[in-house]
Each structure stands twice: as C-alpha cells, then as structure tokens.
Amino acid sequence: MIDYIIVGCGLGGIAFAEKSLQNNKSIIVINNKSHHASKIAAGLYNPVILKRFSQVWQANKQLDLLEVFYKNLEIKLNCKLDYKLPLLRKFYSIEEQNNWFQASDKPNLSKFLSTDLILNKLKYVTSPFGFGEVKFTGYIDTQLLVEEYQKHLQITNLYIEEAFSHAALEVFEDFVTYKNIRAKNIVFAEGFGMVLNPFFNDLPLDGTKGELLIIKAPNLDLNVILKSGVYVIPLGNDLYKVGATYNWDDKTNNPTEEGKRELLDHLMQLLSCDIEIVVHLAGVRPTVKDRKPIIGTHFTHKNIHLLNGLGTRGVMLAPAMASDLFNFIENSVPLDDHIDIKRFNKP
C-alpha cells in the first residue's frame, strides 16, 4: 500500500508530490494531459495586487516557500525555472503616481514598492507618466516545469498518464483502491477538471478562461516585466509572453480571435515596435469567487482530499497550499479558514 495517489500534475499536483517525497511518503501520480492550464500559465509571481496597490494574501509566506521550492526543483530536474526580474507597473495619471507613493508608505507594502519613480524612457514603450517598480517579482517557466517533472516521474515509475476514472475509485474506511493501486489517501489536484469529479463537483469552482500570446519583437530589447492592460514578460531570444484575458463564460481551451484582438489592442497601447505572433494559447484557470484556494478533506470520506482553486497565482500559491494540506493530513495542523473547503459546508 502506498501513501498517496495524486490526481493531476499541474502546479498543485507537483507541489504536493514534492512535499510528500521530501517526507519519505510513497506516491503515484495519475495525470490527464488534456488538462493543461499550468503549462500555458504566465508563471508570474508578484506580491502586490496592482489594480488596488494592496498586498497579496500571505505574500511573505508564499514568497519564502516559493524561493526554496523552485530552487530545489531546478537542482532536481537540472534545468532553469525561476527567472527573477523586476516588474514595472505603468502609470496612467498623476493620481496613480500619488496612489502608488501612498501605498509604498504602508508597512506591509514598503519592501515591495520602490519609491523611485521610473521616468527614463524604455525603447519602443509608451508611458508618459512613467512606471513604479515592484520588487521580489519574476516568473517560473511553468511549461518546462510540468514537462520535466512528468519525465522525472516517468523515469522513477511514479507516473500514469490517463484520464482518471472516478467510477473506478473504491473508498474504504482506512484506504482507497484505484484499479490495482491501494493507497492510504488520494489527493485530487485536477484544476478545472474538478467539475467532473463527483466527490467535489458541488464546490463553487468557477473556471476562468485565459488567453496569451508568445510574440517576437527583435527591436524591443526588454529585460524587465511590464504590466499595464497586459503583462509583457521577456523570455529571451527576442521572445515575449503577453497576457492575459479573462473570460468567465467560455470553458474551452480553444484560442479565439476575440482573445487575440483584446491582447493586441492592449499591446499596441504599450509598444510602438513591430511584433510577430509566434504562438496563441488558451486554458481554463481553476478560480473561486472568493479568490481563495479550496483545500481540505472530503466532508464524509477522511482519506479523500482536495488541492484546487489556485487561480491566477498558482506559482505562488502551490508550494504553500501543498505544505498546508500535507501538514493537515499528516500532522492534524488546522487549515486557515480562508482556504478550508469547510467554508462551503453551510448547514
């Protein structure tokens, strides 16, 4: 009997697999490659909500765990994943500049928001009111992470690639069985695929479709992340990731002309150089209306668990949420009320 069946190999599944292996637990990961929101994610980590100039929930804890988690994965997988780059937030008015400086005086934001207004011109970037710099930002190469981690699991015989059949799961008092696998626990980290999971599909997961572009811009020569109506992330070799859209109605992974046009409209307001679209991608993020993850144990089955709802901040949330869930299962450490699925179990 193994300790954990983990369903899903996106950011949440990878983070829980790593936490389990680091604690000498035995695992098997079952993954359906058609669920690929993590692979097309921006991978951006940023401790500040830039619409309101407020701190991301538990930002300090998440950044601390993120640093160690991805560094260890870089060593384990022998590839570069974490690209630390400053983020420049475009200002649209003097009022926004003033709001930025007011926010930078707050104790919880002062270490993240630079008080130096950046007015020096970036080549081919339009910004008459300048930029504010956010510190402790960067991006994770999520596509490479998912691909290399799956390869690693395959090599170590810890990976099954198939669509998980919930009907084949048998639940007993102290263990579960799935086909020929017996495990003490099963953790579902299926992302938006959770809507098909009969154990948890009554939870309010509200998938949000996002589209992004990979563009080539040989003249741009940018070495910072830009954030305006869209983000622009330099990937090297004159390539940039541009995103993202938010669509609450379309639940498909198909790129759309409307999404592309929205991204290009924003991009043209920011850049004045020629660009070429290299790739157009789309996926459905697992989001929740209260903007918090949904973590915890099934209301009636003590060996069925959930790690989901990481939304648009998956690279920051995944290490922290996986650690919280593991400590809850193994050490009975209570979950934060903000993330516990019990918040939806209303009498």
Image (cartoon, rainbow, N blue to C red):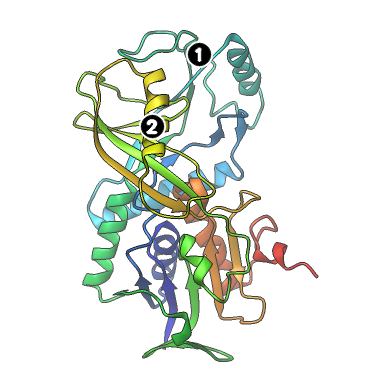
Residue 119 lies, with reference to residue 136, above or below; the image says above
Amino acid type, mark 1: Asp
Tell me what residue is drawn at x 34 percent, y 63 percent: 34
User: In the rendered image, which quarter contains the C terminus?
Assistant: bottom right
Name the one closer to the observer, 328 or 343: 343
**SS assignment at label 2:** helix
Tell me what residue is drawn at x 60 percent, y 19 percent: 100
- Mark 2 surroundings: few (<14), some (14-19) or many (≥20) residues within 10 A: few
User: In the rendered image, which quarter contains the N terminus?
Assistant: bottom left
Earlier-in-chain disc, 1 versus 2: 1
Name the one closer to the observer, 196 or 249: 249
Residue 42 lies, with reference to residue 158, above or below; the image says above
Residue located farthest toward the right when viewing the structure as drawn: 347
Residue position for label 1: 116
Residue 23 lies, with reference to residue 174, above or below; the image says above
**SS assignment at label 1:** loop
Residue position for label 2: 261
Which x, y percent locates residue 290? 66, 50
Which x, y percent locates residue 65? 48, 50
Residue 76 seen in render:
no
Q: Nearer the viewer, mark 1 or mark 2?
A: 2
Q: Image check: 160 left or right of 209? A: left
Tell me what residue is drawn at x 25 percent, y 73 percent: 156
Residue located farthest toward the front when viewing the structure as drawn: 257
- Mark 1 surroundings: few (<14), some (14-19) or many (≥20) residues within 10 A: few
Tell me what residue is drawn at x 35 percent, y 46 percent: 255
Which x, y percent locates residue 9? 37, 64
